Image (cartoon, coloured by chain):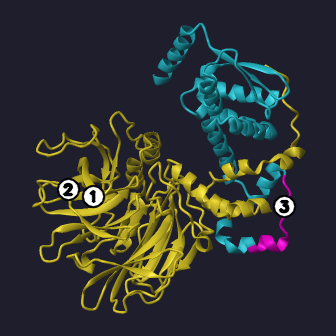
Chain colours: A yellow, B cyan
Amino acid sequence: MSEAPASNNMEKTSSKLPPDLFMEILSWIPARALLKLRCVRKHWYSMTTDPVFIRFHLQRQQLLPQVTSVLTFHKQPNDRAVLCLLDVVDAPWAAKHVAVWDNHPLLNISSPCHGLICLYHIYTEPDVCLYNPATRKSFSLPQNFTSEDILLSAFCLGYHPISRQYKVIHVFCTRSNALGMEVLTVGGSTWRKVEVSSARTTFTSIKMGRPSATGTMYWLALRQGTLEDIILSVDLDDERFIEVPLPQTERHHEEGYKSLTELEGTIHLVSHWFAKADWMDIWMLRELGAHRLWIHRFHLRLYDLPRGVRPMERELPTPNPANPSPPERSCKPVISAAFRFPQSAVYCPTTMICYAVSGREGEERAGGPSNPWGSRMRTNEVAGNRLWGILASMVRMMPDLLGYEQKDAKTFVLWALFEAPPAKNMEMTELPSDLFMEILSWIPARALLKL
Amino acid sequence: MSTESKEILVGESSQAKPEKKTIVLMASDGDEFVVDVDDITNQSEMIRNLISDMGGTDGLQVPLLNVTAPVLAKLLELFNVSNKNDDDEEVTQKVKELMEAELNMMIDVLGAANYIEATSFFDLSCKVLADKFKGMSVEEVREFLNIECDFTEEELQQIHAENAWAFD
C-alpha cells in the first residue's frame, strides 16, 4: 500500500508521548496498579491525582463489564472486624486483608457507593469516616449532629447525579426510642435534619440503606405495630422522606424473607418464600419522576445443596402457573447452584447473594467438572449483564464464604464491589477535592461488590 | 459452527456489492488512499459526519494533515481486520503485535485513530496498552516507554511510603 513504516526508533518515544493519550490509557488501569505506576514520571503523578482524571477513571472503570474483585466485611468472634478483597478473576481465590480492626465489636459498614464505604459504630462514639478500600484512605466526618440525644446510629452514603454531591445519611434512635434522620453533604460541615415524623417504624427494624443510581436512598423496615414490611426513601437532592408501597402479590400472607438490593444501578426487592416451597421473586423499582413502579423480573426456584457438595447445574422447572405476573423477559433462568447458609447464619440484607443463578436462554452451561468456575466467569462476560454477572460470580465465591461461615457463626456482609453500575447517562461527580483527591476508583471490577 | 456460518456470510456480502462506493483519504505527505465508504464510516465518526455534512461521497477527498502515509496505511490495515471480524479478538491480537514490534508506530496509530474519532478502535488499543502496563513494575514501564524518571530519590520514597501496600 505504501512505503515501509518509519524505522523503529525508540529514542524518540518519550518526546512524542502525547499527554492526552496517556490519560486515556491510564484510565483503563485499575486503582492499585495505578497507585504504583504514577511514580513513573512527574507528569503521570500530577495527572492521576487530578480530580478531572479521578472522575474520568471512575467512569471508565465502571464501564468495564467484568467483575474482578469482591469486597467482604466480616466479623470474627474475638471482636475483630476484617475487610478483605477477593480477586475473582485471578485464581487462586486468596483473600487479601485490606484492613483489620481489633476490639471493635460494633463496627459497621454502609453499602458502597462509587467504591466508598462509610465506617461507623452503632454507638456513635469514636469516629465516623468514609473509607476508600482502593486507596486505603479515610476521611472523618464532622460529629456536630442535630440531636444530642442519640442512642444508636447507622450511616449510609449516596450520590446524587444531578447535584453531583455525595451525601451521608445518619439514621438514629433517641433514648425515647424515636427515629431521626439527618443529612450531611460530603465536604460540608453541617448536618441537616430530615423530617421523618410520618415514619411509623423503629430504628431497630430498619435495614441497611441502599442508594440507587438516580440519587435516592432506600431502606426496608417494619411498620410499628403491624410488623408489615415497608420501604422508606430519602431523595438525596431535596432531602425529602417518603414511603414507597411494596409490590402487590398474592403471596403477601405467606411467610417470606425480604431484602433490598441494588443491581444495575436500580433498586430490587428480593422476596424469598420458604413456607411451602423455596421460591424467590425479584422485582425492580422503576423511578419515574415522583412515581414508583415495581416490575416483576424473576421468579426462581431455589435448591438446597448440602454443605460440601459441589455446585451443579439444574434446570428450572416451569414457572408456577399461579404466578400472577410472568417475568418481564422470557428468559428461563437456570439455577446453577443454590446455597443456603447453615441455619445458624443470620440473614443479612444481602441474602440474595447466598444464591447463585446463571444463564439466560441458550447460554453456555458450566464447563466440565474440572473447572466449573472458569466457564461460569466466561458466561458473565458474554452476557454482559451485570445482574447475572454479580450473581454468577457469587458462585465462585461460595467455597470461601462457607469456609468463613464454618469458622464463625456471626453475621457477615458481602457485596459486589462496584455496586451500582451507573445508568448510562449518569454523570460523574465532582469529588470534594481534599478527601477524594485520592480516589481512584476500584478495580476493573466495576466493581463487583460495590465498593 | 458459528464461525463457519460467519465466514459464509462475509463471502456473500462481499460478492453482493460489485459497485463499492469509495472516498479518498490523503495523508499529510500527499499519498492517497482509496477506501470503501462503509468500511471507513463504520470506524470513524469524523468521516461519517463529514460525509453527511457534504451530502454525499462523490469525489470526496479527505485530507488528514496530522497523519503520515505509513501510519494511515497501518491504521487502515487494522480497520480492515476489525471490519472483518465480529469480535475484537483478532484486532486486539494485531494491536498487541504492533505494540511489541513498533511502539512508536503504535502510538502514532493511536493518535491518528483519536484524530479521526475512531472511538471503539481507540478505546480497544488503549486497553491493550493499559493491560500491558498493569502487569509491569514502574521500572519496566519506564524502560518500555523509554522515559527518564524525573523524581528525586526523596520524592520517590515519599510516594512509596504513602501507598506502600500497593507495591507489595
Q: Which mark is residue A247?
A: 2
Residue A305 seen in render: no
Numbered disc in front, either 2 or 1: 2
- Relative to A204, say whether A3 is above or below: above
Query: SS for tag 2?
Result: loop
Q: Which mark is residue B56?
A: none
Q: Residue furthest front?
A: B54
What residue appears at the point 64 percent right and 25 percent down from the top-left corner?
A: B40
> In the image, is residue A108 part of the stretch drawn in magenta?
no
What residue appears at the point 31 percent right and 59 percent down from the top-left corner?
A: A352
Which badge, 2 or 1, comes first in the chain's sequence?
Answer: 2
Could you confirm whether marks 2 and 3 are on the same chain? no
**Chain ID, mark 1:** A
Question: What's drawn in magenta, residue-wise?
Answer: B147-158
What residue appears at the point 52 percent right and 11 percent down from the top-left corner?
A: B12
Numbered disc in front, either 2 or 3: 2
The residue singled out by tag 1 in the image is A269
Query: SS for tag 1?
Result: strand
Image position, residue A187 (x, y; %): 54, 75
